[in-house]
Every structure is written in structure tokens, then in C-alpha cells.
Image: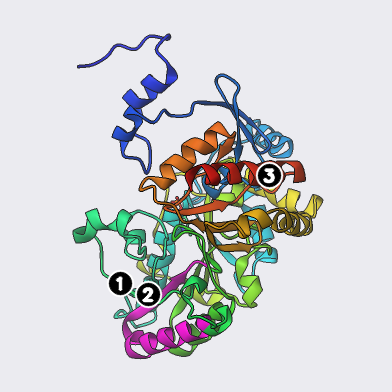
Amino acid sequence: MIVRMTSNTSLLTRSLSAVWHPCTQMKRHETLPLVPIARGKGVWLHDLEDRRYLDAVSSWWVNLFGHSEPRINAALTDQLGKLEHVMLAGFTHEPVVQLSERLRELAPNGLGHCFYGSDGASATEIALKMSAHYWRNNGQPEKTQFVSLQNSYHGETLGALSVTDVALFRDAYGPLIRQNATVPSPDWRNAQEGESAEAFALRCAQALDQHLQQHHHEIAAMIIEPLIQGAAGMAMYHPAYLRAARELCTRYGVHLIADEIAVGMGRTGTLFACEQADISPDFLLLSKGITGGYLPLSIVMTTDDIYQAFYADETARGFLHSHSYTGNPLACRAALATLDIFAQDDVLKANRSKTAFLNLIAEPLRTHARVRNFRNTGMVWAFEVESSHADFAQRCFSLGLEQELLLRPMGNTVYFMPPYVITEEEMQLMVTRTLAVINELT
Ligand SMILES: *Cc1c(COP(=O)(O)O)cnc(C)c1O
């Protein structure tokens, strides 16, 4: 039956009728209400009845400087009066050129060429295609395989799923997905008793060495989330693994794709996570925070060596990949405003103090009898909660809302990934209220 909606029908009912929500078993919403958001300011989201929620997950890891940031708003308003969009094939514009130039200055050495996509998964697709196409153009068409870490996440389109190792997202589509190998993750929670994170990382790198030694003839690239495997449950690892991976990929003639979609833009404490291992990948993927959480945009940065392999008289040697909104001027302006804020506010330095402060006040969480593996990298914190509730994540989410908190645990892993503008008072509130939630659940 088709229900005729009137303007009085609540937003929730209308949403459930017309909108298919992402990453959701829709039937759950028979009992779990949607949260209708009317506006946002700083770290706070406000619902239709003006209840507020502290956005402790930066709206799925995209927001950097809070909601409704005046400088990003102003940049977008200015751009709206000039040019909202133009195709990027055969045309160009100031925002996309400026953004490419500025990222080249900021990124690890050698990443001088920017290719644009619309979201994270499309960046993964672009990098995988570009890598295999590079080898084909260079007379090694047999290099078509990819390798990723166990529990990796690189997006959910079919190509990206082939390098994503999260069963829940993959299993239903098994027959549609190409098989690629995974190698052991250096996630330090899997280290042996008494083994340091660094020693464990180096032990995992030996497994990578063996795999590449045997299979490098058919492998185009390794794709990796530097320092933090986000969707694996904020699995953190020692930068020694990245250094080893860089060295091994170079030795065996395999590209290294650094997926910094979630960890880039200051999230790990440096502008790019790769900096902490002092490495340059062959491809660097950016999305999520690149526009401050305003607009969808992704960027694949790559080297002159790769660019030159496509540069020729024959059309077919070129990279003939396109998205309608490639290099959208509004999204590029949001990204430029985001980079301006990093410079104007010395964000990385301010974040170091915030990180230290939160680590200090999080002591009751770290030492909580039911909390395990409390960990931190830059502006990301995570820990596991021992709880007998089968639906822990759901209950934690619901109880969080009652405490004015947007928490979205992954399984039993609770994490904080707040906007960088969070104040000490707001951090205190986030920790105290999270403790209250955990106490109620354990
Ligand atoms: C979110 C994410 C993606 C996918 O980005 P979408 O914009 O959601 O397609 C890819 N890789 C990593 C590491 C991510 O966190």
C-alpha cells in the first residue's frame, strides 16, 4: 500500500518510507528511532526538538572543524557566486589547480599529479586501475593482482571490496568479487605477550616479504591504511610496518597505495600518516576530511613516473577514467578553505595539546575494569568493552544519545574521533558521559 504523506507526517515516518539508509538493516528502525537533525554548530548536532548530541565520530570520520564552520561557509558562498561546476575534461578552473598545487607542496615527496574522484571508494577504484594500467603500459600486463592487510577496508564498490577484508560487507557479494590475497595485519592487539608493537610489526613485515617474493610477478600493488585500520575497529600499528612495506614494495616492483581517506588531514597527528614513517607511497588517496566534511570529493595523488607511463600519442595509453563531478569547484573550494584553517590556526599543534589533555582525563576509562586495549593515535581513541550484551553497539549508541553523545561503536569497540575544534570542557563531557554509558552496560 502506498501511504499518502502530508506535511504533518513526521520526518521519521517519511524518511523510513522514502529513504533507504546506508549500512542499516532497515527493519531495526521498527524499534530504533532515527535521529532527525535540524542543524549543527561546532561539535554539536541539534535535533528537531533542539536536543543536542556531541558528534564524537565526526559524522562518519569526515568532519574536521565542526559543523557550520564560518570560514568554509564563506568560501562556499563566494564560489557559488562564481562557478558551481564545470566538466574537467578539456576544461579547468582556479580551485582545482590551486588545490592540486597546494597538496603537492604538502604531501610526501614526489606526489606531483592529482586525479580527482567523487568519494573514497572511487579513489580506491582509480588507484587500482591506474596501477594495473601502468604495468600494462610498461609491458607487464600480467601484474593484475592486489594485496591488502587482513581486516582492511578500502570502500564498498566491487573493485574496492576486492581489497576489503570485512566479512560483513563482502560475503553477500562473494561471487561478484575478484579474489585478492591478504597478509597478516600488524594490529598490535595481536602481538604476543611481552612482544613490542614494533617487534610485532616487523614480524608481520616478514610475512609480507614472503608473499611478495613468491607472487610479485602478478602483483600490481599493495593497498594499505597507514597507522590505523579504521573499519577493522580502529586497529593501530607501529610505523615500522609502513617503512618495511615501502622498502619491500620497491624491492619487488610493486606499487604502494596509501589509503589516507580516513587517516589523512591531520587525524593521526601529522597532516598525512605516512609522514610518521617518513615514506612516500606511489599513490596517496584522500577523501573524507579533505573538504572539512562539507562535500564529497576524493583525490588520488601519484608520481611523475606513473604519470609518464600514460603520456603518449595513443589514446588507449591514457587513463580514460571519469566521474561526472570530477574536480567539482565547490568541493575544491571547501578543501582550500580547510587547508587555510590548518595554516591559520596551527591546527596540528593545537591538536597535540588536545590529545595530551584527553589522554589525561581518560584515565578512568583506561583503567576501567571492563575496558581493554585503550589506545590512541593523534585524534583517534579506541578501546574494547567487555560486555555480555549481544547488541552492545546498538545499546551503546542508544544510551549515548540519552547522554547527548553520538557514539557509534563497531562491535565491542568504542571510539572517539571528534572534530578538532572540540574544547577541553567538551572532551570532559565526552569522557564522563561515555563512562556513564559503559557503567550502565557492564
Ligand atoms: C571511508 C573509507 C573509504 C571509502 O570512502 P567512501 O567515501 O565511504 O566511499 C575507503 N578507505 C578508507 C580507509 C575509509 O575509511
Residue that label 2 marks: 147
Residue that label 1 marks: 180
Dominant secondary structure of the residues highlighted in magenta in the image: helix
Region rendered in magenta: 200-225
User: Which residue occupies the foreground of this view, 206 or 95?
Assistant: 206
User: Which residue occupies the foreground of this view, 243 or 390?
Assistant: 390
User: Which amino acid type is shown beneath numbered disc 1?
Assistant: Asn
Labels 3 and 1 touching (C-beta < 8 A): no
Residue 318 shows up from this direction? no
Q: Quadrant of the N terminus?
A: top left
At x 36%, y 54%, the residue is 156
Residue 337 picture location, percent across and down: 70, 45
User: Which residue occupies the foreground of this view, 431 or 24?
Assistant: 431
At x 47%, y 36%, the residue is 398
* Res 275 → quadrant: bottom right
User: Which residue occupies the foreground of this view, 159 or 382?
Assistant: 382
265 with respect to 154 (left or right)? right
Which of the two labelled residues, at mark 3 and mark 2, occupies the earlier sequence position? 3
Residue 324 picture location, percent across and down: 43, 45
Q: Residues within 10 Å of mark 3 (few under 14, many from 20)?
A: many
Q: Secondary structure at mark 1?
A: loop
Q: Eyeballing the image, is 170 above or below 112?
A: above
Asked if the magenta segment contains residue 215, the reply would be: yes
User: Which amino acid type is shown beneath numbered disc 3?
Assistant: Phe
